[in-house]
Image (cartoon, coloured by chain):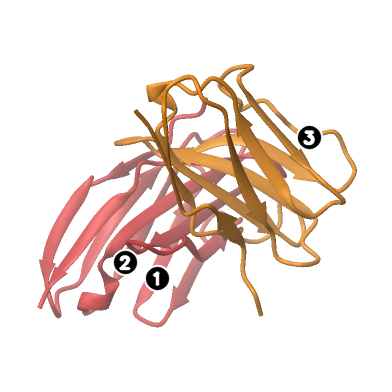
Amino acid sequence: GAGVSQSPSNKVTEKGKDVELRCDPISGHTALYWYRQSLGQGLEFLIYFQGNSAPDKSGLPSDRFSAERTGGSVSTLTIQRTQQEDSAVYLCASSPTPGVGGQYFGPGTRLTVL
Amino acid sequence: ILNVEQSPQSLHVQEGDSTNFTCSFPSSNFYALHWYRWETAKSPEALFVMTLNGDEKKKGRISATLNTKEGYSYLYIKGSQPEDSATYLCAFQTGANNLFFGTGTRLTVIP
């Protein structure tokens, strides 16, 4: 079946612009996670959605970052007024049951802020 | 932010060699330990999720052990093949939400 998909695969933007990154989780997966990997760093948790519960935003690095999940499925991560330090690979993952078993990752979006 | 350390950062082995690497994590608030394989231009793929002290998991030529009391896990690859070349990530889980990832071990298997 279809895995987690993300778009775009690559995004180059200028400093100060806003960007939107999209994630389509596996159908039926209730948990959705966003991570990013900056150069030389480990995967960093950003935000977690579970069903209709309020998202866990504890990993968002600043108020320029926000995310939403519509209808319990597709999620969009928005970065406003991008900075060069936002350059990273942004990964989305989903799981059928939060906290149990592994997560299924998408291919990521490579964001480059010039 | 919890400290999850992996070593070595990278290694090169010859095809056919066996190898292992380490993941160290806090010994408190343990829920689960994950291993993922991340090949270039692909998505990270779950290898193992371990929850109990002393757990050993095996998948083909790859196996992993877990010691929650001392806070470490080993990943072993027996008879490395070029297709094993990837970055191996471990992640420490404290609850339902968060995985705290290490920076990974980049393995290159030389034919």
Spatial CA span between label 3 and label 2: 36 Å
Q: Secondary structure at mark 3?
A: loop
- Return the disc, 1 or 2, that comes first in the chain's sequence: 1
Image x and y of residue A40, in percent: 29, 36
> As drawn, is B55 to the left or to the right of A70?
left
- The subunit letter for the residue under badge 3 reads A
Image x and y of residue B18, in percent: 20, 72
Label 3: how many Cα within 10 Å (few below 14, some 14–19, many 20+): some
Write down the residue under mark 1.
B63
Q: Quadrant of the C terminus of chain A?
A: top left
- The subunit letter for the residue under badge 2 reads B
Tags 3 and 2 touching, CB below 8 Å: no
Image x and y of residue A11, in percent: 45, 44
> As drawn, is A64 to the left or to the right of B19?
right
Q: Which mark is residue B76?
A: 2
Write down the residue under mark 3.
A55
